[in-house]
Structure formats: structure tokens, C-alpha cells
Image (tube, grey):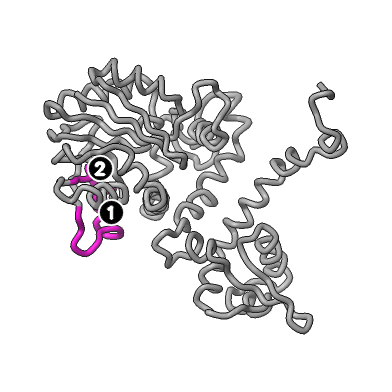
Amino acid sequence: MAEHLSQSELDYPFKLMEYLNGFRISKAIFSACELGVFDLLLESQKPLTAGEVAQKLGTSGDGIERLLDLLVAIEILEVELMQGTAYYNSTDVANLYLAKSSPKSLHSLIIYHSQTTYPLWNNLVDAVREGKNQNEKTFGLPSEEIFSAIYRSEEEMLKFMGLMNSTWVIDGHDIATAFDLSCFKSIIDLGGCSGALAREIAKEYPSSTVMVLDLPEVIQSAQRHFAQQNDTICFQEGNFFDGEIPSADLYILARIIHDWKDDKNVKLLKKIHSACNKGGGVLIAEALLFENRRGPTMVQTFSLNMLVQTEGKEHPPSYYTHLLTEAGFRDVQVYRTGKSYDAILALK
């Protein structure tokens, strides 16, 4: 085995040490978001000392200085020494993706990862041993009710909706433009949550009507917290598993299939096939594994996350092709976006 390693790898496992320390980097970014570091630096419009940041955020001077220095080291913040005093400032990346006020902010995604996903991953060993999610051990909730952790309170539901909103603000355009959807005049985003992906679809295809169908409590929260003035989409309360699915030309299933086991997914897709207008189809947005099981690394981490949080997993394209064919769809097309989520289109 040793002959396959370079001398530097034999002397010191640089890549391995980088991976082992990865959780510290993540938690530092999470903590800075929760404390409001990036919002403060953006709003200040000028560099601040660690003492000024500590005073405004109500933290210790020593603690915030160490956090700021790490954020500088990973190139999320900048620092300049003037007469022996360090002044900290935001980078364009921090302003665009980490400050809450940015239209491309990942703040909600980060808060969800910090307060919900991170605690679940503390029980990853048990999840691997037991082969089931860790909602009960982490949050004291029934493991068989996978969304009980998400909807256990209004606050937790809004965190999840914020996560989904952030996801599609970043990746939605790539999903909306993966295929030409202009022939589909009525589109329903099943489980569309805050409506962020539906809005991207509506923006690209203004001649189509786009609806979000989700559980009543989700729709009500979406309308209270995420609806926009002159919104390009509409909302309808419903349960696409247990209730009726309205007829439409195209159905969107974004990050839905990966939550569930095969039998439930086939049942849902058959139900969609029955409701779908002739010549219509289904657009699936999921993170796709490689067929050879060698990655992508991010998608493999997503799949482990499904183990600790749900009853599902991530899959390669062949899984979706088989599932859609079994449900009666044809002409399955796969498009890899090169981003976090990929697109699959199948026709009736």
C-alpha cells in the first residue's frame, strides 16, 4: 500500500487532517452566522476591531477575536493591521451568501444545519449501527414520523422552510433551465414549501401557471412569511400522499423522492401518472450519485444525512429511471447541473 503514497503523504497525512478538522470549520461558520458577525460587518460599512465587534454583539473580546481570525484564515473575512491593531472586514462572498439581508443568503440553510442537522450527526454511529434515523434520540420524537422533527414547532418549521428557500435561491435557476419546459402550461410543485423553486420556474416560463401544493400548515406559513408582492405563483393546501392531486401538465418533485422508501415512491409516482394530463410529465430535482458509487462526495454526505434524519437515501440516475418506468412514465432524461442538485424529466 505504501508504494501508492507520495513522500509528503507518508510524512504527513495532509488531506486526512483537513477532513478530520472539517467539523470545526463548519461550526465556526455556523457560530458566526448565529452571532450575527456577517450582518454586523456588512452594515458597519467600515472595518471593525475585535473589541468593537465584541461590544456590539455582546461576546467576549478574546473569543470573538479567535473566531474572526479563523474566518480570515479560510478567506471568508479580511483583516488589516494598522498601528498594531487588527481591523476586520467582510469579503464579497460573506456579503453575498452569509449576510441575512442578501437575496442569495444561505443564512437560513446554515442555521438549520447548526441547530437541527448538526445535533443529529452527533448520533451518526448509532444511525449506522441501527440503520434508522436519530430523531427520537436527538429530539425525543418518534423515529417513524420523519417530519415530526421538522414540524415539531412553528419555529422549527420556519427553519426548514428557510433551508429550502435558501437551497432553491442558489440552485433553482439550474433546475428550472435544465430542460425546455415551455410546452407545459400548468405546473404543480408538490411539496414546494416556501415556493422558491416554483418562482424560478414561473420566472423562466411566464406563460405557464405555477402552483405550490403542500400541507395546510406549510402553505399558511409560506403565505405569511415567504409570499411576495405581485407573486407569480399560487398556493393550494393538500396532501399529495393521502389526498387528491389536481390534474396538470407537469409535476415537480424537488427533494421529495430521497425522503422515502421504494414502495412509497412508486405509489406516489403512479398517483402522479394517473393525475397527469396526456403528454405531460414529472420533473424530479435530486442530488444524484455516480453509478460507480465513487461520489460525488457532497452527495454521499447527503445520503448519510438521510440516514440520520429520514427513512430515505440518495440514488444514482438508474434508480430514478427504474422508478419512473415502473410508474408508467417514459423518455426519462437526466441532466447533471454540476451544482448540488440535478434534474430528471420523464413524460407520460
Relative vertical location of residue 233 with respect to residue 63 in this rendering, above or below: above
Relative vertical location of residue 339 with respect to residue 131 in this rendering, above or below: below
* Residue 223 sits inside the magenta stretch: yes
Horizontal and vertical percent position of residue 154: 36, 53
Q: Is 300 in front, or is 15?
A: 15
Q: Which mark is residue 185?
A: none
Q: Residue at x 64, y 80 (%)?
A: 52
Horizontal and vertical percent position of residue 178: 33, 39
Picture quarter containing residue 175? top left
The residue where tag 1 is placed is: 222
Picture quarter containing residue 319? top left
Quarter of the figure with the C terminus: top left
Q: Find numbered disc 1 in the image and state the secondary structure of the residue it sits on.
A: helix
Q: Is 32 in front, or is 150?
A: 32
* Disc on the earlier residue, 1 or 2: 2
Horizontal and vertical percent position of residue 176: 30, 43
Gap in angstroms between the C-alphas marked 1 and 2: 10 Å
Compared across the picture, whether 278 is left or right of 155 comes to left
The residue where tag 2 is placed is: 214
Determine whether label 1 and label 2 are within 8 Å by CB: yes
Q: Residue at x 54, y 38 (%)?
A: 298
Quarter of the figure with the N terminus: top right
Q: Find numbered disc 2 in the image and state the secondary structure of the residue it sits on.
A: strand
